[in-house]
Amino acid sequence: MPARFITRTRLLPYHGTVKAREGDWVRATDVVAELDYVPGVLAKTQIASQLHIPPGQLSAHMLCSVGDRVEQGEPLATSIIFGEAKQALSTVSGYVALISNSQGMVYVRQPVPASDNEPVVIDLVKEMKISKLALIPALRVRPGRIVTPGQVLAMTQEVKPRVVVSPIYGRVESYSDGILTIMPMWARTTLNAYLTGRVKRVIPGQGVEVQAYAHVVTGVYGVGSESGGELMLAADAGEELSPAAVTEQWRGKVVVAGRTASLELLQAAAEMGCAGMVLGHLGFNTLSKYVGLYSRPGVAGEDEVAMPIMLTERFSPAAMEKTRWQELASLQGRYASMSGRTQIRAGLVRPEVVVCEDDWPQHTCDSSELVSGVVQVGDLVRIIRSPYLDQVGRVVRLPQERQVIATGSRLRVAEVALADRVIVVPVANLRKLEGGSAQ
Amino acid sequence: MSEKAFLIVDVGSTTTKAILIERGEDGYRVTQRGEAPTTVEKPDEDVMVGVRNAISQISRPLETTQFLATSSAGGGLQVIVCGLSKFVTAESAERAALGAGAIIMDVFSADDGRSLFEQMEALRRAKPDMVLLAGGIDRAINVDFIIEFCDLLNSTRPVPRFGQGHSLPVIYAGCPNGRPLVQDTLSEGFDLHIVPNLRPDLDEENLEPARDAIHDVFLTHVMAQAPGYPKLKESVSQPVMPTPLAVGRIMTRLAERDNIEIVGADIGGATTDIFSVLEGEFHRTVSANLGMSYSIGNVLLLAGMENIMRWLPISVDQDWLQDRIMDKLVFPTTVPATILDLLLEQALAREALRLSLEHHVSLVKSINKAPSGIRRALLTQNAQAIVTRQRQQLLDMRRISLIVGSGGVLSHAPRRAQAAAMLIDAFAPLGYTFLAVDSIFMMPHLGVLSESEPEIALQVLERDCFVPLGPCVSLISAQGDELGAIAARCSLRTAEGAREAEVRRGEVLTWPLPRDEKAMLRVEAAAGFDFGAGPGRVWEREVRGGVVGVIIDARGQWGDELSLSAQQAMTKQTLLSLGAFTEDELEESAEEVAHLAR
């Protein structure tokens, strides 16, 4: 498939700093935006009573507005009592979140620096200077619990209690022998460009739109998020590799691994640090074991796995379609961006492998990324459901009237010419093959 | 034809359906129909284009008709719900929104297990039509939680789905103490509406004001922003009604008229709606991730392979079957073209319906009385809330007199007997129940019509909307678990004569009885068996026929004690008895399985 113009919107999960500027040329791995902080705890300050004013008049006395940054000790509001100016000060540093005229209070949201990708390991015994036995009643969290910055993790029951608080947003991963491990829940502090191309638009505080001239190979199902690396062909379209095929060469590469893979091969490749894998099909059983706890397949598009996988055909046995394999083969050795994200419902997101070109043609309009799915007479089609599964033929007739098929259902059908005969197939069970249109 | 006629359109998420109801010699009937793709999205972005296309297929001078409309276009009325406690106010708010015909996009509560940051992320992603904010009973003093919700809304500023640049409607139906605070913080950036608390006390719900507000906001704000809707609003003679609300209205009218309890289902590609009218009250739940295409992977995970396989009359390899189901997820718009695929599709439908009904039962419950007197004084509010959570389920299948199915897999099943099989397997009715399917999902049209013309709407419902499948008398309980034991002696007396037969435990017996024909059905239960009159007693009543006939289901409930092969044999007998499939078709499927195994 020839290259075409595509655009991808890159957004931070929360407000941050956009590094790239409109018109910048960026490589796929370049950082285009960074997350500075994540929203933390709300701190409230009773202003009306401090200033001896009715709560309803608070707004008139405010020195700052919602959204303003304030530092600890900075005046939030002021009033004059008996000729003397009185100020109400912020007890924390952060952003003014709410000004309540009914309560006479101001709420300040404290920002929390975004954590890095590493788990936080806290030796509670050492921190609190107590024995492991004394730690048991002091512990306030259990594995699996989500913790926020400043939340108490352990506290002794003394007149002057010793306290350890969470430094990050995260989930308590484990507790053993006085050691508490917290996995950051918000680890992605930088956002890369994903595509090599030009920054088309900057979305202030949130991210960018990147345009690229690229070859896009779309799969039907995938798992895992984004990745990237050199595209490597390890097998033919119909070939099945053994785990022994995984070598040091696979590290950091997006590997086209043929027809299918065993769980052992997937695990060996992930352990090797393979950046991604492209396969024809993969049994659901194998995929479930690879992913682990599987929730809402094809709905959420948020399966966390070390190595993303893209299936080009389906779950039932099938070799990789020849044209698709050939296209991947033609891109071998180039840097490929890959996304395993699949969301079949609500917006239809399919996995993809993208290889961007540095040289652009004259006109820079985005091409349609979806081949029109409407089947017409003359189209080359593949049958994607039994009977005649995987047969390829050309549509010779599209009767206007619905027809009764073998199940007894009355449906729209197409007459498809195979090499040796013409068959009748429900239109819904045909997939138009790229490059095989009527014209 | 008389001058009184009704042109009614339902603007669905994919299809706009128009029907014309006119008076003929035998009363009001649907005389013409038309349908066209809904045009709320690009390139048309004008819902009236699809409405006109659908109406254009109807040939009648339309000036003389009354024009009515319902709508679920663009995914229906999408609402985000916030409440203080997941099982108290958030749950009540969810019920209020569902009852108003909404699709719940997300439910936020202080105890939903998500960090504030995760809630912010989810809220930013969502593009709701409105937010329903609740929390706290009338006695609540501490309203700090409202600050958190208000700040959540203020920091994320979710944008409405339609009418970008307009303020998102927020309906506050929480504790009275929170109202000034909500006004303080949300009145500027949002289109704020304040209504009475939907949960005044732990043991009291007051959902109507919130439901009415949702409906009003839907009509005056959401509809006003959706492309083409202002024109639709101007053209209709009654307010446009959300589709699920209209379904609720017609079902409630029917239940009231016949003094019965009803369960209905609408199974789609992504979601399954379950409706019920119990003790005169309408209930609705949406199982957002149970459906026949986009959500099929979820049905597989939640139901489990054993549960799906028991509905297949043949033995198949589990891995093969699993992959075949997932292939449907990958290509969600494909259709079954072999009997084997049809059997599989219908097996999955049974499980999607069964799980959706389970979900419905779990949500439709009475509210327990909170402890009173000294006990109340001694318990903390949290402890009182826990007491009110232990509630009684309202749905009792023994009291359900009518089950109505709709949605492609039921309404368009190649044979009506297949729809009957899916309904009795999925819903496991107990005692006497009448089964029907909605022929073309006409209930919304009749629901909006019933607001002004209830009798006409009910007349059309019975004549043109419902396809009567037939009465079903199901085993309620049995002593022992011996398959093949005689469960009852049955007889059916019609004007033409009588039929008699024995039905054995594990079997289904079907007798033809054409629709609108009446007959006397007698079920003499064997000792220890109960078909509705009590163990070993005679159940007898006049029944009306249907396109499938009279069904006597002596299978009853089974647990793990029945092997998979025995369950599959039972399924086979059921399908053959009902006439859902023929012996030849089942053999053909078994051959296909054998061929695939080779």
Image (spheres, coloured by chain):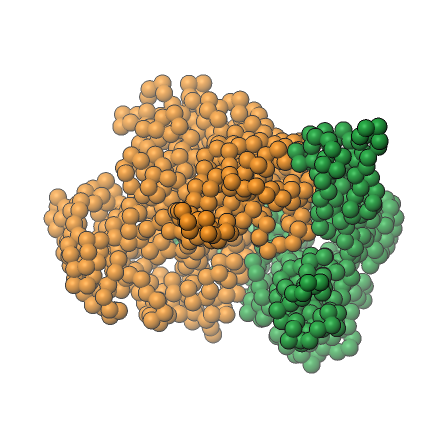
Chain colours: A green, B orange
Q: Nearer the viewer, residue A121 or A161?
A: A161
* x, y percent for residue A12: 75, 50
Please report the residue visible at 78 percent of the width from the left and 75 percent of the height from the top: A249
Q: Is residue A417 above or below residue B567?
A: above
Q: Is residue B287 above or below residue B589?
A: above
Is residue B408 left or right of A170 when viewed as pictured?
left
Position of the N terminus of chain A, as image quadrant, is bottom right
Q: Give the total of numbered labels.
A: 0
Please report the residue visible at 57 percent of the width from the left and 36 percent of the height from the top: B177
Residue B10 seen from this side: no
Is residue B438 left or right of B37 when viewed as pictured?
left
Q: Is residue A203 above or below residue B382?
A: above
* x, y percent for residue B252: 36, 37
Q: Nearer the viewer, residue B194 or B362?
A: B194
Please report the residue visible at 59 percent of the width from the left and 46 percent of the height from the top: A374
Residue B183 seen from this side: yes
* x, y percent for residue B583: 31, 63
* x, y percent for residue A208: 79, 47
Please report the residue visible at 41 percent of the width from the left and 49 percent of the height from the top: B374
- Determine the image quadrant of residue A316: bottom right
- Determine the image quadrant of residue B226: top right
Q: Nearer the viewer, residue B286 or B347?
A: B286
